[in-house]
Image (spheres, rainbow, N blue to C red):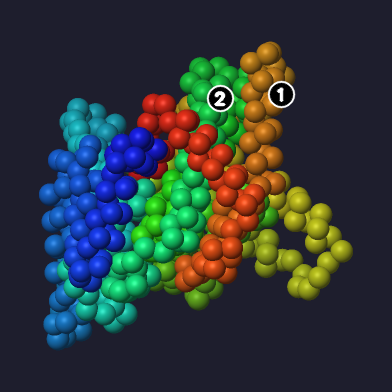
Amino acid sequence: MLFNSYPFILLFLPIVLAGYFGLGRRSNLAPVIWLALTSLAFYAIGNWQFVALLLISIAFNYGIGHLLIVAKLGPSRRKAALALGVIGDLIVLGIFKYAGFVTENVNALAGTHFAIHILLPVGISFYTFTQIAFLVDAYRGQVAAYALPHYALFVTYFPHLIAGPILHHKDMIPQFERKDTKYPDAHLILCGVIIFAIGLFKKTCLADGIQPLVSLAFEARSPSFDQAWLGALAYTFQLYFDFSGYSDMAIGISLTFGIFLPVNFNSPYKATSIVEFWRRWHMTLSQFLRDYLYIPLGGNRRGRLLRYVNLMITMLLGGLWHGAAWTFVVWGALHGAYLCVNHAFNALLPKGPSALAFPGRVAGGALTFLAVVVAWVFFRAPSVEWALRVLRAMADPSNVVFGREEIAALVLVAIYAALVWLAPNTQSIMGYDHGNRRVGEDMRAGRMRPLVLYGASLVLAFGILGIQSHSEFIYFRF
């Protein structure tokens, strides 16, 4: 089931909300169980064959976590339990997500013809990473003993289950355990609907609206200079509005239950460096990679050279997390190289204020955006060869078509660029706290400006009317 569908908006969500708050008047545990069961039902619609896998994963990780938290194991047995949990999770992820990729590359090297076709469970990357973080924190002694229903809801919570954001137990389970979340808050529900409306508009009107332009670069065998650039820019904006739209909808849906999800996007294309870009783009993945991969590898504590090695390893694995293809490996390698260059350049800059600070930010923003667009070409292309073909076209200004179709595409891309760079971030509009701790004072007190309400109503109407083909979100594939 998709957020951008009439059955979800008009049927599923109202039923879940009614049951959640209805049961909350009678019991503290019943609404948690209800939300976990309806989350499983949400996942089962269209993915029923993988419900058993999800339940086994929850039981396995909860059991390992229980050993690490409650059982009085010695240091060696604790390490063994953690290794068992993490390796078990990675084996399952590897079988479903990477077995075909490995087989293809073995066939290419050995000249064999083995074939493995395994259907990828939707959301497996997100719920696997979520649970690995739980096990690592349990090993570190940073996890309390959680009840199974609360843990099951933490993993299956339907607003995030399919495409994130990646949740952290310390942010979510205490909210599920609170009693005051079981009673409706009219102001939070209103704010949640508005944030959902903005996300729906991003998906159905903006992301889906520019999708046809992407074919100019990624479906044409020999795109011209202008077609390649317009297609690459169209995908750059499509991916942002699609994924940030999903994240907005997830935050808005969750807010109607009185539950706060972490912010996942903060106007990333306004970044003036690659380092800043990764603090603004897919923020929960960036935090996971930092806390559970980059820092354990040594971070920047062992000298500059090893810092760059750790950055490259982290981004290469981050690229592979997105998909089993060499295009994602190249994308991760590019961003790893970008980060290394960025940190090396920062080390050469003089400290303190400079008269060139503003021009430097402008140049940094332009260079960062260009680097991100180039990397997105590999992210979108069906193969490395195809990506290189697009990039060669982007580097050849002698081959220009610029007919009516290209002029219309340029106007549309310019409008999207204005939205990206001039519009405030969704959560900034609503006063949603980036620290995931509270809603802004205007939201909490219910002091909503009429202009915001009228605008949100219009956006919601356009978003609902924009639902045509129930197109999947791009990150469903990851």
Is 361 located above or below residue 434 in the figure?
Answer: above
Closer to the chain start, of discs 1 and 2, is 2
The percent coordinates of residue 224 (x first, y second) are 63, 19
Whether tag 1 and tag 2 are in contact, CB under 8 A, the answer is no
Q: Residue at x 50, y 51 (%)?
A: 195
Is 465 located above or below residue 434 in the figure?
Answer: above
Is 55 located above or below residue 174 in the figure?
Answer: above
Residue in front for this viewpoint, 47 or 301: 47
Q: Amino acid at mark 1?
A: Pro
The circle drawn on residue 187 is: none
Of all residues, the one furthest to the right in this rendering is 355
Q: Residue at x 25, y 66 (%)?
A: 24
Question: Callout 1: 10 Å neighbours few (<14), some, many (20+)?
Answer: few
Residue in front for this viewpoint, 207 or 450: 450
The percent coordinates of residue 142 (x first, y second) are 32, 80
**Secondary element at image label 2:** helix
Alpha carbon distance from label 1 to label 2: 19 Å
* Quadrant of the image containing the N terminus: top left
Residue in front for this viewpoint, 277 or 450: 450
Residue in front for this viewpoint, 22 or 299: 22
Q: Left or right: where does residue 209 sit relative to residue 85?
A: right
**Secondary element at image label 1:** loop
* Residue 350 visible in this rendered orientation of the protein: yes
Residue tagged by mark 1?
397
Residue tagged by mark 2?
213
Q: Amino acid at mark 2?
A: Leu
Q: Residue at x 20, y 69 (%)?
A: 26
